[in-house]
């Protein structure tokens, strides 16, 4: 693997060289020379940032982009999405995932936490594009299909890809998985040290029904079942919009990860009041996601970050909340931390997951503040170059497999929608 040497790129408003060796950032500074045989990348008119970790997706749902809009969550799922998902197979998931990974790379994401079906097909697609994926195996009901034998067979199958691909246990939600299933998944998560990725409190009615059925709220239920304890350090609750004071304390006590998906929550009309400050102060690791393209319509983490920040400022009537530096951490290093990857900062020793943005993109003209321009003015198309785990995935916005992916994704969509 050849070293990569980035010459004269802007880092925190100052020009520098960056050396990448053995998958890590090995040197930063204008005095860092280009080693013999290194790949040289011109950093002129570019700024460097860590790449994003998209912490809640259903990647293959990219094939549903633009299908069934302006509907409430349960109608959208029951009447539109779930009937078509019956047509999913390895081919549709493979091309849907390839399409999603292409979009993620093109907008600066190098790691994502997924939840879907046909895991081997998704793993093949993600690893071919060189992006990091944590693929949640979706479970419903009593989750009886998730046996130790099954998990071990998937782990063995993915072993050759394991540098970039890992799996997670993903019970769908407390309203689709039984108490027995929720516990079963937690035991598997603990036994194999896998992330426990679940939809939590996305809508208010979900919480009302949980209280009716179980006599307590969703996070209280998981604590009562011993799930929070069994999954400590490996819990990732997507959405977590409708949490009360006691639930925020539970989330903080177990240092759990919660993922805000502002674009999806707003488009599905699920809600807007994410308790960012309270969760952060209680000790939760707050991360950012887009959710699947069927509800967020794109996978642009810059857009998701901007909307998250503006929502917090607006609902609290306080423009100082979630300032740009903190917002960047939520979208980058906080997510990588949950995934067990030492990335999300441009610093010597960190994993080489980084992107160069084009300072000639109009969002950076004039460039009074590069970080503010990235998060508040730019879109994903300002990303010019992406490096993941020390490999170049995109340069000058070019990914060699893109044309094939577009053509095949269109073909796979026709089969899915039949
Ligand atoms: Zn979701």
Image (cartoon, rainbow, N blue to C red):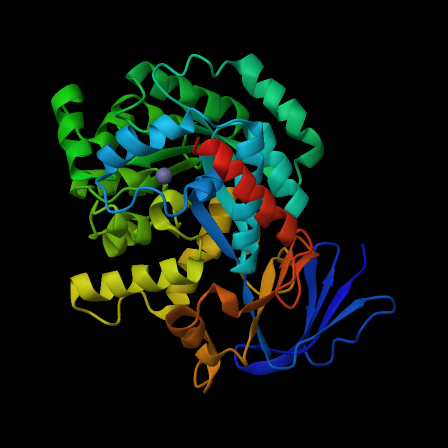
| Left or right: 407, with 418 as reference point | right
Whether residue 69 is situated above or below residue 277 in the rendered picture: above
The image quadrant that residue 224 belongs to is top left
The extreme right residue here reads: 36
- Nearest to the observer: residue 381 or residue 156: 381
Q: Residue at x 60, y 35 (%)?
A: 123
Give the answer, above or below, for where 56 lies relative to 278: above
Determine the image quadrant of residue 250.
top left
Q: Residue at x 23, y 51 (%)?
A: 275
Residue 387 shows up from this direction: yes
Query: Which image quarter is the N terminus in?
Result: bottom right
The number of numbered discs placed on residues in the rendered structure image is 0
Work out whether residue 58 or residue 306 is closer to the camera in this orientation and state it.
58
Ligand 1 shows up in which quadrant of the image? top left
Q: Position of residue 412 (x, y in %)?
A: 54, 37
Question: Looking at the image, is 212 positioned above or below residue 341?
Answer: above
Residue at 48% x, 56% y: name it. Answer: 333
Q: Is residue 131 visible?
A: no
In the picture shown, does residue 291 fall above or below 191?
Answer: below
Measuring from the top left, give residue 394's x and y in whole percent: 65, 60
As drawn, is 159 to the left or to the right of 199? right
Residue 280 placement (x, y as % from top left): 31, 53
Seen at 37% across and 43% down, the residue is: 294
Q: Out of 223 and 328, give the one closest to the viewer.
A: 328
Question: In which quarter of the view is residue 352 placed?
Answer: bottom right
Quarter of the image with the C terminus is: top left
């Amino acid at each position: 693997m050849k070293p990569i040497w980035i010459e004269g790129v802007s880092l925190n408003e100052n020009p520098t060289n960056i050396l990448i060796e053995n998958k890590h950032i090995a040197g930063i500074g204008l005095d860092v020379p280009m080693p013999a045989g290194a790949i040289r990348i011109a950093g002129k008119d570019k700024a460097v940032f860590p790449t994003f970790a998209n912490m809640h997706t259903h990647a293959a749902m990219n094939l549903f982009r633009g299908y069934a809009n302006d509907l409430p969550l349960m109608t959208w799922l029951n009447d539109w999405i779930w009937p078509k998902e019956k047509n999913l197979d390895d081919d549709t998931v493979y091309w849907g995932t390839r399409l999603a990974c292409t979009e993620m790379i093109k907008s600066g994401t190098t790691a994502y936490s997924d939840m879907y079906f046909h895991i081997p097909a998704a793993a093949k697609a993600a690893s071919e594009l060189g992006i990091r994926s944590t693929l949640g195996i979706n479970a419903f009901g009593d989750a009886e299909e998730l046996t130790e034998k099954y998990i071990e067979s998937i782990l063995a199958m993915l072993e050759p890809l394991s540098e970039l691909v890992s799996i997670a246990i993903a019970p769908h939600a407390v309203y689709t998985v039984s108490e027995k299933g929720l516990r079963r998944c937690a035991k598997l998560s603990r036994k194999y040290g896998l992330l426990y990725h679940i939809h939590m409190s996305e809508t208010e009615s979900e919480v009302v029904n949980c209280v009716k059925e179980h006599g307590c709220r969703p996070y209280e239920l998981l604590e009562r079942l011993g799930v929070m304890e069994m999954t400590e350090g490996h819990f990732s609750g997507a959405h977590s919009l409708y949490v009360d004071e006691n639930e925020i304390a539970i989330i903080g006590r177990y240092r759990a990860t919660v993922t805000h998906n502002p674009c999806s929550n707003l488009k599905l009309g699920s809600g807007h009041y994410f308790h960012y400050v309270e969760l952060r102060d209680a000790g939760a690791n707050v991360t950012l996601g887009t959710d699947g393209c069927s509800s967020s319509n794109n996978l642009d983490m810059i857009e998701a970050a901007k909307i998250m920040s503006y929502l917090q400022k607006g609902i609290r009537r306080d423009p100082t909340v979630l300032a740009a530096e903190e917002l960047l951490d939520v979208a980058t290093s906080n997510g990588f931390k949950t995934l067990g990857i030492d990335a999300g900062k441009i610093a010597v020793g960190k994993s080489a997951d980084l992107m160069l943005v084009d300072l000639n993109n109009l969002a950076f003209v004039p460039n009074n503040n590069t970080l503010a321009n990235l998060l508040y003015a730019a879109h994903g198309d300002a990303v010019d170059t992406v490096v993941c785990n020390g490999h170049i995935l995109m340069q000058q916005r070019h990914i060699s497999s893109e044309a094939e992916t577009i053509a095949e994704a269109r073909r796979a969509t026709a089969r899915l929608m039949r």
